[in-house]
Image: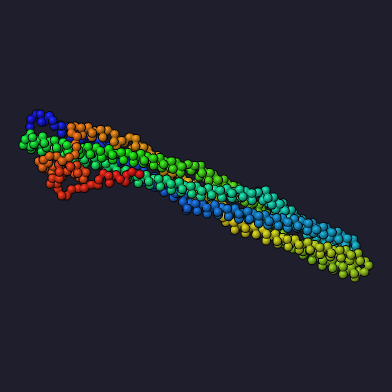
Amino acid sequence: MNSDGMSRRPDLRAVSDQLEAARSRIEERFVEGGRALMAAYDIVARLLAAIEGVTGALDDHACDEAAARLTATLKGLTDLVEAEAAAGQRLASILADGEAITPRTRDMQRSLRYLTTCAMETRIAGAGVSEFAQFADDVDKYVGSAIGQIDVFAAKVGELSTQLAAACAGGKGNSLEAQVSAVSSTLIEALEAVHSRRAGLRRLAAGTADVARSVQEKVGKVLSALQVGDVARQQIEHVQAGIAILLDELARCDSERQADALNQVAIRLLTAQTSAMIKDFTEQTRVVVASIEGLAGEAERVLALNGKAGCGSGETMQAIEEGVSLARSVVGDIERSGMLAAAAYAATKQVANELLSNMGNIGNIRSVRDDIRCLAINAYLRSNRLGAKGRAVGVVAAEMNTYAARLGVAAEDILQRLSTMRETAAGIDADNRDRHVNIVSEVDGAVATLREATAQTNLHLKEASESGNAIAERIGHIARDIDFAKDLGERLEACRRLFGSDGHLGLAKDAEEHARFSERLLAVYTMAAERDIHRAILGSGNAPALVVETKESEDLFDDVLF
């Protein structure tokens, strides 16, 4: 092997070193891209989980619970209005009865005063008759006691009427129906806003989820397409293996001619393999880059949809919570008003009970009526036996009997009205006991449910927003900073030029002379395309029957484009 022959040969070790540098760069570049894409894949998974959380936070259960509580609140408010109206009617009824008692007590007072006058006239008319004097004393005794009792009774009637009038006036001044109407409108609007927000989030989340799944699928396809790096790595290693086999075979050559012939055909083969590798790598990396650019567009769609999903979230839910809180405040005012009214009812009941406890006094007055009538009848009968002398006493006795009867009629009417007042007051107590719905508690429960749903929704929206931003940033980094083709093609082309051959296809002459080199190298290949090039130059030789097949590059990347 002379020096001239050696000078025509490329520095195969230098070529192998350059190929190793290119292989290292390809491996580094594609590993970095694979890691970035895997991170993006994981982020998309987090985004999908966050989207599910958004739709789950404000779910049917939360909305139904809030709706149930608000509905209970509305019913409680309606019942409150009805109860207050009924209580007001009862108070008005008690007031009417109390006011009706007042003129009856005045009638009784007038009757008793007249009976006192009658007793004095009896003394005058029956002067000198001891029986008539005793009759006059008895009348004074009974009437005096009755006058004291009626005065106490009349004072209590006046106190009751004052209390009832104040309670009725207070109920009218609360404008309860107007307040309840405003609160009901607010609660209904809040509930409608909750359902509207839920429907809007579901629509946006569904759209975002569809795009996110599309991104996830395409990231997976790009990850599959990154096998181009592994394919290129294997092809480089096979060319390096060819160089190593060539060097070994050259060392075994018996003559310079044989070495030159082997070197020439081997370099042509290795150059052809390198050229094919460059062509495949260029085409396939172009597919990868185009796929990533399309993926970046999808990521931007995720970001836009995600931003739209979060848009207005805080304002909408805050408005809902403020509306319900306002309703709770108004309901609280109504409850406090009800408590004041209840205090008025209690005070009225107390006065009514004290008044009703004087029924015995009215009963005593009825007894006074009966006693006076008996005395008057006896006096009248006695006066008839006395003839003309007793006639004046008889007239007075008849008058006393008449007024005693009037006293009894008034007493009976007062007793009847007192009984009605007692029953009506008992009805107010029964209504208060039956009013068991805690309106403020129901509104607070609705607020708490919505607040919790709002917090969960905002938490998931924040996670979705962060994930969407991370996806866009990660894919933007891949598209911007990880160029799968930059300078790698030039490196491989420089390696091809180092071979100093055009690598044209065409069966070499005397290919059987290179059978051992051919067989050794053919056993290294793992791709059908490599074997095809090999056989086109060196022939089939005695290649092993069993070799590892991989998919053709065209099949490998057919489904990457989208």
Residue 46 visible in the picture: no
Left or right: 470 with respect to 70?
left
Residue with the most extreme right position = 388
Could you say which is closer to the camera, residue 187 or residue 251? Answer: 251
Residue under the image location 43 percent in, 42 percent down? 306
Question: In the rendering, at what x and y percent does residue 237 appear?
Answer: 19, 39
Question: In the rendering, at what x and y percent does residue 26 appear?
Answer: 25, 37
Could you say which is closer to the camera, residue 270 or residue 220? Answer: 270
Left or right: 267 with respect to 557?
left
Judge whether 393 appears above or below 341 on screen. Answer: below
Quarter holding the N terminus is top left
Quarter holding the C terminus is top left
Question: In the rendering, at what x and y percent does residue 125 appear?
Answer: 90, 62
Judge whether 126 appears above or below 209 on screen. Answer: below
Residue under the image location 51 percent in, 42 percent down? 315
Circle count? 0
Q: How is the protein colored in the picture?
A: rainbow
